[in-house]
Image (tube, rainbow, N blue to C red):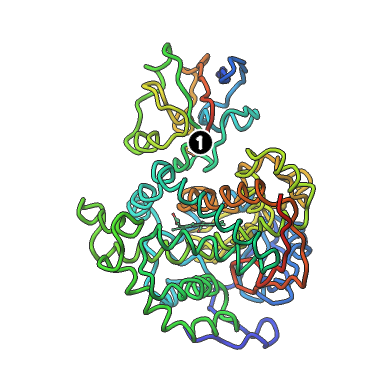
């Protein structure tokens, strides 16, 4: 897609042509807000604006990108759980595939609706099932222990590059069955995918401009002959032999895991370490009860929401909490704002590792709820358990730098010092 | 409203009332029953809503689906012939009085 200028004032950057905003007499008026949730100053501190979005009404309209948006828990949850009305097949980014050609061949799972989605989802559910996790568990745990031992040797390091990135990179590509060569493309490719869900701003434009080598790598790495036996990739291709998917579909499903399986956990683990570094009393509670490791990770996913937003497109006229939204409209879901909605959560600004996290939408909800959630939780749990057993304190020792992406929230750099237990 | 009794691993029993049409997993979460985790919110992904159905009720809760059967292979506590995923048990008036036993661990 050709990107337009983002520095132009609001209202001139008409990305897609929509009809007039419906204004049904019987329904509540939708508040228009002049908020750009894909701008650098927003990313620097989204929480005050999330509050504005939630408080303005159950549904708001963002003039900057001509989209409806929901930021309260109840509406986000409702939209996620009505895939017939709020479809994914027209793209889960701003771009409407009914009007624009997708920047890459459409995902067969993320950007699909039932019944097509049901078939591919069943395949990935099996490839990433609880039984498969049981087999991976010991290896993932040993790698987490080894990583923490290595970092304790060093004492001071960057918890983003050396931990949040290094640990998933040490387990996930091997679990996929990827070749050793070319893995340096994985994070840039994922960064591109998640930037591309956003509007045609500079982040998206730059990412797509630089994408050719990463796309070429991913394309070739998704082919059957390039995936080691026993890995997730080979398991997907094996489903061709059982007739569940076609030979053309398998590489695209492998691509889904390469797109969504690494950078997300990097930011999830990064979020957890950043939380434990900022809230030492929570780290102390974790150290005194290791069984909290899994929930401490889950709470970090709620608290920081590594995946901040996704879109849906309406398939019909619909009322959301009394607000009318016409057919063919993009609806932006603020997962992160829902995860801190005081209407749903007691003390939402508090990172509390004993919180009942169930129901948070950091992994989505409903039929598209993250198919890799067990992989993410496994990585998160074994890493937090290793930290809790081996590290006495995590101290932030330098400037914390944010990384900017249209969809993912995380850090560029988190200098820390570990004191051994 | 149908009532469900959850019997914890340590034999403690909790009886709660369920909404018609809710799943047994959802009912447990709603009432803060600790022995059920339900990490995937009923998406039939996580196998952390494992229960053992009391023998008297086994015939009434319906059959194990093919996908559920595979998921049950991944439960953390032992799988028994009466193992079910509670998110796949839909509560109706006919299940009033249902007794579900909770495994030692879900994760
Ligand atoms: C902390 C880490 C992760 C977070 C926060 C996360 C978040 C999400 C969210 C919010 C969705 C829902 C998308 C929607 O509703 O449109 C999703 C879907 C998905 N995730 Fe994850 N994810 C994580 C890790 C992973 C991992 C490790 C994998 C692969 C191994 C993965 C693969 C996928 C795929 C393929 C989908 C599409 C599922 C569908 O449409 O049915 N994710 N993820
Ligand atoms: S709640 Fe996850 S499988 Fe039942």
| Percent x, y of residue A339 | 67, 52
A391 vs A209: above or below: above
Q: Is residue A153 above or below residue A97?
A: above
**Helix, strand or loop under label 1:** loop
**What residue sits 56% from the left and 20% below the top?**
B9
Q: Report whether B101 appears left or right of A417.
A: left
Front-lying residue, A144 or A10: A144
Instruction: Name which residue lies at 47% across and 29% down.
Output: B77
Name the spot of residue B96 as percent of width and height, x first.
51, 16
Is residue A24 placed above or below A345 in the rendered structure? below
Q: Residue at x 45, y 50 (%)?
A: A139
- Left or right: B76, with A148 as reference point: left
For the point 43% across and 42% down, the residue is: A134
Residue at the spot of label 1: B48
Q: Measured from the top left, where is residue A174 in percent x and y?
A: 40, 61
Residue A228 in which image quadrant: bottom left
| Residue farthest toward the top in the current orientation of the protein | B56
**Viewer-proximal residue among A24 and A292:** A292
Residue A185, percent from left and from top? 45, 76
* Figure disc tally: 1
Does the numbered disc 1 mark a residue whose Cβ is under 8 Å from ligand 2?
yes
- Crowding around mark 1 (Cα neighbors within 10 Å: few <14, some 14 to 19, many 20+) is many
Residue A24 visible in the shown view: no
State which chain disc 1 sits on.
Answer: B
């Amino acid at each position: 897609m050709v990107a337009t200028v983002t520095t132009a004032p609001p209202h001139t950057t008409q990305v897609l042509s929509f009809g007039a905003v419906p204004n049904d007499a019987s329904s509540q008026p939708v508040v228009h807000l002049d908020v750009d949730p894909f701008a650098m100053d927003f990313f620097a501190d989204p929480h005050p604006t999330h509050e504005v979005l939630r408080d303005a009404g159950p549904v708001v309209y963002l003039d900057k990108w001509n989209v409806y948006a929901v930021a309260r828990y109840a509406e986000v949850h409702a939209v996620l759980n009505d895939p017939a009305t709020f479809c994914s097949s027209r793209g889960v980014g701003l771009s409407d595939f009914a009007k624009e050609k997708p920047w890459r061949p459409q995902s067969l799972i993320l950007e699909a609706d039932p019944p097509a989605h049901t078939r591919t989802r069943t395949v990935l559910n099996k490839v990433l099932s609880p039984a498969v996790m049981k087999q991976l568990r010991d290896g993932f745990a040993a790698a987490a222990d080894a990583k923490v031992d290595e970092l304790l040797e060093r004492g001071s390091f960057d918890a983003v590059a050396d931990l949040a990135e290094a640990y998933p990179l040490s387990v996930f590509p091997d679990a996929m069955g990827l070749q050793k060569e070319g893995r340096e493309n994985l994070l840039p490719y994922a960064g591109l995918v998640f930037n591309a869900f956003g509007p045609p701003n500079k982040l998206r434009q730059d990412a797509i401009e630089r994408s050719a080598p990463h796309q070429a790598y991913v394309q070739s790495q998704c082919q059957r002959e390039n995936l080691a036996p026993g890995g997730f990739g080979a398991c997907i291709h094996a489903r061709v032999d059982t007739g569940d998917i076609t030979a053309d579909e398998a590489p695209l499903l492998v691509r889904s895991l390469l797109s969504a399986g690494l950078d997300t956990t990097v930011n999830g683990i990064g979020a957890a370490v950043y939380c434990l570094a900022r809230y030492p009393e929570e780290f102390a509670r974790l150290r005194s009860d290791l069984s909290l490791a899994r929930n401490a990770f889950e709470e970090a996913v709620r608290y920081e929401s590594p995946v901040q937003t996704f879109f849906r497109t309406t398939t019909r006229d619909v009322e959301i909490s009394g607000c009318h939204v016409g057919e063919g409209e993009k609806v932006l879901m603020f997962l992160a704002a829902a995860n801190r909605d005081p209407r749903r959560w007691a003390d939402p600004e508090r990172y509390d590792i004993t919180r009942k996290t169930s129901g948070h939408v950091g992994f989505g909800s409903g039929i598209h709820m993250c198919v890799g959630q067990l992989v993410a939780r496994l990585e998160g749990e074994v890493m937090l358990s290793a930290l809790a057993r081996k590290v006495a304190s995590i101290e932030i020792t330098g400037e914390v730098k944010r990384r900017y992406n249209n969809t993912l929230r995380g850090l560029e750099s988190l200098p820390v010092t570990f004191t051994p237990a | 409203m149908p009532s469900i009794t959850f019997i914890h691993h340590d034999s403690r029993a909790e009886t709660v009332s369920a909404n018609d049409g809710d799943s047994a997993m959802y009912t447990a979460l709603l009432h803060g029953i600790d022995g059920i985790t339900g990490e995937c919110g009923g998406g039939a992904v996580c196998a952390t809503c494992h229960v053992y159905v009391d023998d008297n009720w086994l015939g009434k809760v319906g059959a194990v689906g093919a996908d559920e059967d595979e998921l049950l292979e991944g439960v953390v506590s032992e799988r028994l012939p009466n193992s079910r995923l509670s998110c796949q048990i839909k509560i109706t008036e006919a299940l009033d009085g249902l007794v579900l036993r909770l495994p030692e661990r879900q994760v």
